[in-house]
Image (cartoon, rainbow, N blue to C red):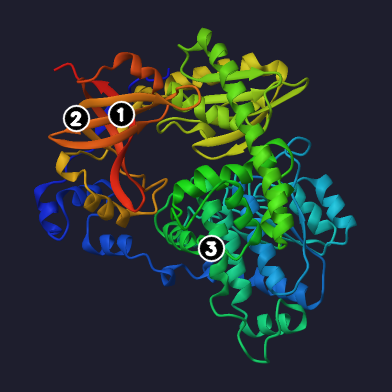
Amino acid sequence: MECMSRVWKLKPKAPEDFLRKFPQYSPLISQLLYDRGLLEPEDVEEFFNVEYGKLHDPFLFLDMAKAVARIWQAIENKENIFIYGDYDADAVTANAVLQQTFRYLGVEVQSYIPDRFTEGYGLNVEAFEKIRSAGANLVITVDCGTNSLDVAEYCKKNGIDLIITDHHEILDGKPDAFALINPKNPDDRYPCQDITGVGVAFKLACGILSEQDKVSSARRKGGSRPVPTGEYHQEGWEKWLLDLVAIGTVADCHSLIGENRILVKYGLMVLRKTRWVGLRALMRSAALDLEQRPPDTYTLGFIIAPRLNAAGRLEHADIALHLLMENDPIKAQERAFALEEINRRRQGLTERVMSEAREKIIPIQDRKIIVLMAEGWPKGVVGLAAGKIAEEFGKPTIVLEKNDGQSTGSARTVGEFDIMKALKSVSDQLVRFGGHKQAAGLTLETDKFEEFYQQLLRYAETHLKEEDLQRSLVLDAELSSAYLTLDTLEELKKFEPFGTGNPRPKFAINDCKVLAFRVVGANGQHLQMTLEKNNTTVPSVAFGWGKFAQNLKIGDTINIAAELMEDGWNGRREVKLRVIDIKQNNN
């Protein structure tokens, strides 16, 4: 499937009356505004002028006041507080956000993260029995708990107040918890439905810190530094948490519009001067130099987040959390190097699973849904493999680690096909499942695999549309050589941060002459080209297109789909193209 071109779909051109509405912008920028549904001047103003002060009041959450009051009661009574979180980057950063907040207040809390391999996702009664034995009076969840009705009941019976902070859909009724802080709560009216687990945790931290007199009192008694009576702690201290919030938000692939856009934009600013020793160590071990190259959402989503996720995928997420909480520079660097090694192992295992999976796909490649199961595919990387296969083959994909008794895995979708609805349709074949429209986790009885697959295929016959199966690439506009400039790059920066809901603009650039090319990378998997369009020369790189070099010769004319990047050395700056797709031009 490598080097297989996709169907290009150009977005509709902005009408002339829309272009006239924004004379201050170039036709290209106006087209991008139109593509994003920013149709009125006030919408554009809000999109381009991202202000921290526009974040929603945390007390718009129905149970926020109740939760904050209970937490301060626990602090003042020196009760045992536990934070219970999932093992992915969203949950780990959410855990760190609350722990750093409590540390700032001089309050010791304990943390519990379930083991992916022995406990699985979410809350479980056995874990809460351990937490109860440790003397917990109050448990705050992050990024989980909404659908753990049995654990909420256990807490109520055993005198543990449970505050759930989460963002997942409610499946089978609300838990009977002390407080439920979740934008998906149907009784709630919080304006941003798409906030992440770490975003909800940040809102709780803001709620806690809003009690200014109590914060000052707590810090005088045991906090990080003495504070004179009556003085507010450090106004705006919660902003130092925003780098963690940005990492978790981007890692969880949530829409970067509205409140998430504010959180990530300011989080990227904070990251450059982060206070967290462990996070600085992680960036050093990943060879990130934020002075030379300011961080963007790629930094968060493809460099930092995978390393945090790697701990929970192969070993235990505590490794990542302890790094984020580490204050000693030497210990932090040791922890960061250990995490770097785990991430290298994760990369190797993912490649092995992908290689074996491609072989298994051959006899079933005509099916509308790909479902694979094999022994020895680590539970921690099957989700990564499912995502890569879905993208490569353009089909909804489920990848499972085969075990005696029960097998566990992950599902990823394509197009508008709702994978959660698909799993609900075959729920009688599943032990458990959970997730959202684009991705899900599931467990089934191993001996029911074939029956499960056949039922899923029958569902796909009536619900999976042909347009969902097209390996399509949506492009914002066709770009002329006049826009291959640094000025265009500066204009595009206004749209940052890029991500889900606000993707980096992709352009069709036709009739490019190949002046030079070579394969690069350890295995020659990438392709570098120097291209010319209308006497404008531009360097380019096409990741994963190394084999396409066999079809190229100097002087060929090609059409490319690409993103504009900035490249430079020794103080020089130039435009570079990141080529996503290539089509031979037969004219």
Of callouts 3 and 1, which one flags the residue occurring earlier in the amino acid sequence?
A: 3
Q: Amino acid at mark 1?
A: Met
Q: How many marks?
A: 3
* Mark 2: secondary structure: strand
Foreground disc of the pair 1, 2: 1
Residue at x 49%, y 48% (from the top left corner): 299
| Horizontal side, residue 31 vs residue 429: left or right | left
The picture quadrant where one finds residue 386 is: top right
Of residue 282 and residue 422, the one placed in the foreground of this image is: 282
Tell me if I can see residue 533 in this picture: yes
Residue 530 image position (x, y, % from top left): 27, 31
Residue 15 image position (x, y, % from top left): 12, 46
The residue wearing badge 3 is 242
The residue wearing badge 1 is 529
| Horizontal side, residue 236 vs residue 218: left or right | left
Residue 260 image position (x, y, % from top left): 45, 57
Q: Judge the density around disc 3: few (<14), some (14-19), many (≥20) Cα neighbours within 10 Å.
A: many
Q: Does the residue at mark 3 contact the one at mark 2 (Cβ under 8 Å)?
A: no
Find residue 510 and name its label: 2
Residue 336 image position (x, y, % from top left): 67, 49
The picture quadrant where one finds residue 224 is: bottom right
Cα–Cα gap, marks 3 and 1? 39 Å
Residue 87 to residue 63: above or below:
above
Of callouts 3 and 2, which one flags the residue occurring earlier in the amino acid sequence?
A: 3
